[in-house]
Amino acid sequence: MQDKEEMTSMTTVEKKLKSQGYTHDFTVKDGRLTTMDNDSARTFSPEEATIVDYFRFEGESNPDDAAILYAVETADGAKGTISSAYGAYANGDVDQFILQIESLGKNLMKGKK
């Protein structure tokens, strides 16, 4: 059985994913998934990205603290993560990009990595 901290901490999940090769931090700019590498940023369309897994987090004292973390792999093999909040604090650009990936059927079943 995993302890509660391991199951609910975004930092802990990010560390685990990094150990599995998900080393890029992604963002969405101009409708494209973008690596946040300072010296060699790359961009990807929804067709070039696949959602490999996702993790949901809820704030213990405030439901507005809910967030989701996606593990993403690109067509060229880049692996990384991108996150968004739920509700009023959600990142609309990230949410729209993720919906485009899902509409292409490129969201794999959770845990089927």
Image (tube, rainbow, N blue to C red):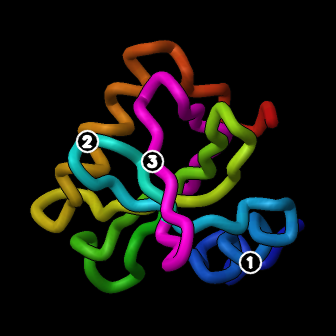
The verdict on residue 53 being magenta is yes
Q: Residues within 10 Å of mark 2 (few under 14, many from 20)?
A: some
Disc 3 is placed on an element classified as: strand
Cα distance, mark 1 to mark 2? 27 Å
Name which residue type carries label 2. Answer: Gly
Q: Residue at x 86, y 61 (%)?
A: 20
Quadrant position of the N terminus in the picture: bottom right
Pointers 3 and 1 in contact (C-beta within 8 Å) = no
Q: Position of residue 113 (x, y in %)?
A: 81, 36
Q: Residue at x 69, y 52 (%)?
A: 79
Q: Residues within 10 Å of mark 1 (few under 14, many from 20)?
A: few
Q: Position of residue 58 (x, y in %)?
A: 41, 69
Disc 2 is placed on an element classified as: loop
Q: Nearer the viewer, mark 1 or mark 2?
A: 2
Cα distance, mark 3 to mark 1? 23 Å
Label disc, if present, on residue 31 of the rendered structure: 2
Q: Nearer the viewer, mark 3 or mark 1?
A: 3
N-terminal label among 2 and 3: 2
Q: Is residue 55 left or right of residue 90?
A: right
Pointers 2 and 3 in contact (C-beta within 8 Å) = no
Q: Is residue 12 left or right of residue 70?
A: right
Q: Which residue is mark 3?
A: 43
Relative vertical location of residue 16 with respect to residue 60 in this rendering, above or below: above
Cα distance, mark 2 to mark 3? 10 Å
Picture quadrant of residue 55 = bottom right
Q: Position of residue 89 (x, y in %)?
A: 16, 67
Magenta stretch, residue numbers: 36-55
Name which residue type carries label 1. Answer: Lys
Q: Which residue is mark 1?
A: 15
Relative vertical location of residue 82 with respect to residue 45 in this rendering, above or below: below
Q: Residue furthest left?
A: 88
